[in-house]
Amino acid sequence: MKWKKLGKIFNPLNHQLPNRCIEFAQSPQTLIFDNFVRIYFSTREKDQTGKYLSHISFIDIDKKFKNIINVSSDTVIKLGELGCFDEHGIFPINIFKENDKIHAYTTGWNRKVSVSADASIGYATSHDNGLTFDKLGTGPILTSNLNEPFLVGDAFVTKFKNLYHMWYIYGNKWISDPSEKEPQRIYKIVHATSKNGINWEREGKHIITDVIGENECQALPTVIYHKQKYHMYFCFRDAIGFRFDESKGYKIGYAYSYDLINWKRDDENAGITKGPEGSWDSNMICYPHLFKCDNKIYLLYNGNEFGRFGFGIAVLED
């Protein structure tokens, strides 16, 4: 896999976003239209206590990914009510269009006391061509269970051979370290299938091997079928020290499969790395999203500070 970077295409600091949001355009994910591409992302506002809330916004951009046509001006999907799994934010949202139906799989999160947060996966649909989404209910469709005890999120859903597939993450432990002010989470990529896109059969096993030890954190899987095999991109980092040590921050990981069950990790052939010193993605590259548009394959991704200053795009060179 070899990617040509086309540069950063959106900086939230240059636009006024709804819900009093400032900075951050994290986890860009797409909905393809005839004449433009809608890119959803998670941005942030500060509540009355100074803590962040995560909201979903979007931009519409031409298919050359140069000219922004529109920026969302209204709430795309409401946060959860008091005590709900998505009370404090939605990050990310994954959009899956099937015929005329637009599905949304959300990662809703809420603050905790002993640790920073928990998360679950929700479901919503759009009845206005993706401008807004209505939730199926106030609760999640996928949440913690006996084998996946917390932090269930980062869903990526697609359909192969009349079966819905979801790749997502779950937290398997929290750890404490003297260098960190609070416990840090560890999460891994797993897989589930469904016949209707709402009720899921979970496999409950870690499918991507670790390369930096058992405390490797894996996030935001995205999968595409190309040239007789399935390709997965994701990001990974160390659990400890990633906020102040650049070498421990997020990097892009890559794996491939021929059967959607067994995955071979092959980061050396991911074809994309951090940018040169001083660039917007020089310290970090994270939150990838694969998609096809007009017979080309693209990769959206975030750069430094977890997407504080926007996202960029690369095109696959065959």
Image (tube, helix red, strand yellow):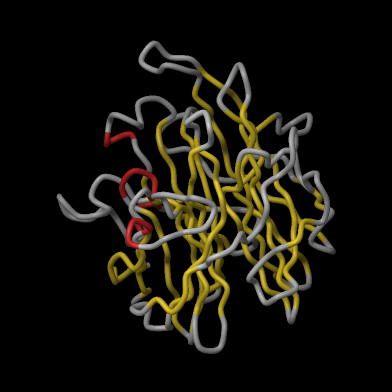
Q: Horizontal placement of 194 versus 292: left or right?
A: right
Which is nearer the eye, 240 or 100?
100
Q: Residue furthest left?
A: 277
**Where, by quadrant of the figure, is residue 56 drawn?**
bottom right
Q: Position of residue 196 (x, y in %)?
A: 84, 64
Which is nearer the eye, 164 or 94?
94
Q: Residue furthest top?
A: 178
**Residue beneath the point at 55% across and 41% down:** 53
Q: Position of residue 239 (x, y in %)?
A: 44, 29
Q: Position of residue 64 (x, y in %)?
A: 37, 83
Above-or-below relation of 268 to 100: above
Q: Identify the image quadrant of the C terminus.
A: bottom left
**Residue beneath the point at 79% across and 61% down:** 197
Above-or-below relation of 282 to 17: above
Q: Identify the image quadrant of the N terminus.
A: bottom left
Q: Position of residue 8 (x, y in %)?
A: 30, 64
**Where, by quadrant of the figure, is residue 130 drawn?**
bottom right
Q: Horizontal placement of 302 versus 134: left or right?
A: left
